[in-house]
Amino acid sequence: MNVPIKVFLVDDHEIFRNGLKQLINSEDDMEVIGEAGDGESALQDLATIVPDVIIMDIRMSGINGLEAGQAILKMRHESKIIFFSLYDSPDYVAKALDMQASGFILKDTSNKIFLNAIRTVYAGRFYFIGEVTDILVKKYLESQRGTLGRHPAPEAVSLSRREQEILQMISDDLTTKEVAELLNVSVRTVEAHRQNILRKFHTNNMDEVLQTLKN
């Protein structure tokens, strides 16, 4: 039997935290091994607990999630952090990227996507949903200005929330059918979003899009 993914939850809303705990513990391949209601308690507990994945709320009283996360990553190199927020803030995403967090997802995401994010970062990959896609695209396009003159201006590339979710899943090597099942939409809907993404990047090759975001 495989050892379950050990998850630690940090959120200042007990009811919300309990809901996450119930969801995670209902899965065969993961379990909650600890929880905290604020950043300070999390730092104390994680001095002795070693989780695989930490789900960290950002906006908390006292030590906020970003401050706590930065300290935890220094203390627990082996643990992965996924920041969890109600707010799709470019500032939050940029700080999460700068501290080399493994993920950033929004609190109104679906249960399937939330669980997929945990499995993805546990496997050593990254899972970012929200403003991060636009931030990476803009950084890339800024670096390309003046080269061939065929790239659109940074502000011209803007992906919708659903397009960002699909692009993340494609980068995780999920098939169109698997993406459709995770999002509870039809395969045709996923294909339509794929075509929109390709159109915005002025290419017919999804590998080029993925390579763009990695550079």
Image (cartoon, helix red, strand yellow):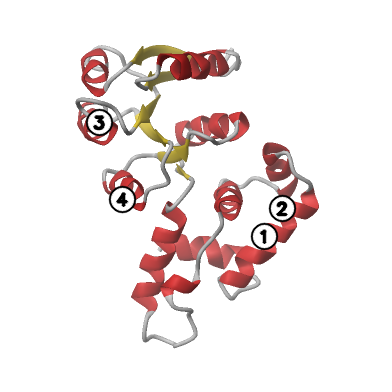
| Residue drawn at 33 percent across, 33 percent down | 58
Task: Say which element carries label 2.
Answer: helix
Label 4: how many Cα within 10 Å (few below 14, some 14–19, many 20+): few
Q: Is residue 85 left or right of residue 37?
A: right
Residue where numbered disc 1 is placed: 194
| 146 to 39, vertically: above or below | below
**x and y percentages locating residue 185 in the rendered image:** 75, 44
> Does the residue at mark 4 contact the one at mark 1 (Cβ under 8 Å)?
no
Going by the numbered disc 2, the residue's amino acid type is: Val
Which mark is on residue 91?
Answer: 4
| Residue drawn at 54 percent across, 18 percent down | 24
Going by the numbered disc 4, the residue's amino acid type is: Asp
> Nearer the viewer's eye, disc 4 or disc 1?
4
Q: What is the spatial separation of the Cα atoms under label 3 and label 1, in whole angstroms? A: 36 Å
Q: Quadrant of residue 82?
A: top left
Q: What is the spatial separation of the Cα atoms under label 2 and label 3, in whole angstroms? A: 36 Å
Query: Disc 4 or 1, which lies upstream in sequence?
Result: 4
Task: Say which element carries label 4.
Answer: helix
Going by the numbered disc 3, the residue's amino acid type is: Asn
Q: What is the spatial separation of the Cα atoms under label 3 and label 4, in whole angstroms? A: 14 Å
> Nearer the viewer's eye, disc 3 or disc 1?
3
Residue where numbered disc 3 is placed: 64
> Nearer the viewer's eye, disc 4 or disc 2?
4
Query: Disc 4 or 2, which lies upstream in sequence?
Result: 4
Task: Say which element carries label 3.
Answer: loop
Q: Quadrant of residue 142?
A: bottom left
Q: What is the spatial separation of the Cα atoms under label 2 and label 1, in whole angstroms? A: 6 Å
Q: What is the spatial separation of the Cα atoms under label 4 and label 1, in whole angstroms? A: 27 Å
Residue where numbered disc 2 is placed: 190
Q: What is the spatial separation of the Cα atoms under label 4 and label 2, in whole angstroms? A: 29 Å
